[in-house]
Amino acid sequence: MQVRFLDDSTSGEARIVAHLVNQNALPAGLEPVLAEGAAMSRFAGKAGQVFEGFAERGGKVVRVALAGIGAAGAEDRKASLEQAGAALAAKYLASGEEEMLIDLTGAGLSASEVAAVLLGARLRAWRHDAYRTKLSDEKKPSLKSIAVKGAVAGSDAAWQVEAALAEGVEFTKLLVAEPGNAIYPESFVARCEEKMQGTGLALRVLHPDDMRRLGMGALLGVAQGSAREARVLVIEWQGGAKGERPLALVGKGVTFDTGGISLKPPAGMEDMKWDMGGAGVVAGTMLALARRGAKANVVGLCGLVENMPDGNAQRPGDVVTSMSGQTIEVINTDAEGRLVLCDVLTFAQRGFNPSAIIDLATLTGAMIVSLGHEYGGMFANDEALAAKIDKAGKASGDKVWRFPLGKAYDKLIDSAIADMKNMGARYGGSITAAQFLQRFIEDGRPWAHLDIAGMVWADKPGATWDKGATGYGVRLMDTFVRDNLEG
């Protein structure tokens, strides 16, 4: 979705004209027929409400949309503005028109508020139609651009920052939405190399021989049942002070998860193409940081495997040795994400000495049972880090809810024959998974684990996404970096 800003001397030619409306305050000078129609339709300017009418302007009939932005001064103002932009994009994406004019004259929006409206519109307009060959014309997206009239000075610059964020979210959505025969470890890397070329990001790839030399037996154990070789992708952004320790973002990238020998039930297994959602978030975040020139040092690491059940696959009861030297009894091969993450966490710490680590993973179905699809689960060994992530979640809309860690839970993953098991008993599954990962955090380094299993995919449209990949996590991490690493 392209955005262009019109100066005061330019009049838009679009056949769709949208006005943003504060709650219970119709725009001054609105045609009486539109004002009366809005009232009859019970349009009140609530966030996300859209009313459409028709009027003659400049000698031609145009579609006039009124989009509610909620009450002025409301605490959730930014979210309301995004919701208004998203509602307009959803309504007119397949309207047959290529451009929509948003007239902000008299709306009283700041530059950042204008950018919020446009961000909502662009995010909601994203669709993945690559494999649809028989869409009827009325269902094909037609809206290609938004023209903005009456924006305050600085709006264009504010939008360029949010446009970089939008590109990162869109890249994450694409990676998550693609099927397992299109995205696998090697092709995930290739997509990132292509997308990130010329951005200033430095990419490095570990192949199986590299991982064997490093002792990544846990990660390689997951991959050994697949014809697709594992990869570890390292993405570095050096936008901060030279020599300053980076933030490390670590993503689980199981590009397809059958469960391995502990095979999942067939029903719904197709959804497991998005089990690489954590790695997708890391890739999208790194792209967004580079595109907007973030003044911070950040390294993203993606552990990429496919979990398959062939004759060479890992068995329940096998014991593997992780890069840390700790041994793991594999109780269930479907508890594979933590086996991937533990080796990448060790590699991140020993290779980059980060100031803090945040890992993101579609790790447990238990998290969906706990939180549904409203929050990502957060675990942390550091109070300050947890508070900063929580604040970033509230500001970005990618909300998190903190769960406990403790010795009582930790005992549940003790093994009789190895240092630990890869899963505990039936209850508290998300917590024991986090306890497992914590055993690989060295020297009390600040660390947070985000279990985003319920958030990367949606079965119905949301405020700023269509059904499917949501892009959850990119805005959370980008906001965290803005607020805490860029001063």
Image: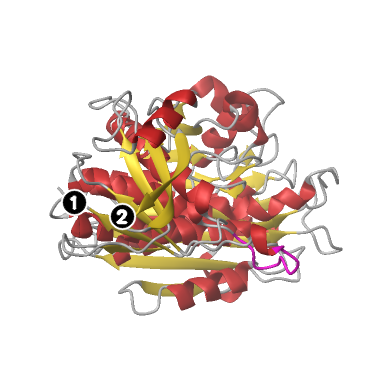
Colouring method of the image: secondary structure
Magenta segment, which residues? 128-136
Instruction: Give percent across and percent down for residue 36.
Output: 41, 28
Give the farthest residue toward the front.
Answer: 59
Callout 2, which amino acid? Glu
Apparent side of residue 287 relative to residue 456 in the rendered image (left or right): left
Task: Tell me the number on the disc at residue 486.
Answer: 1
* Residue depicted at 34% across the width and 79% down the height: 198
Q: CA distance from mark 1 to mark 2?
A: 16 Å
- Which residue carries the number 2 mark? 162
Kindly indicate the quadrant of the structure image that contains residue 391: top left
Along the line of sight, the residue nearer the viewer: 346 or 340: 340
Kindly indicate the quadrant of the structure image that contains residue 307: bottom right
Along the line of sight, the residue nearer the viewer: 283 or 322: 283
Looking at the image, residue 450 lies above or below residue 114: above
Is 327 contained in the magenta span? no
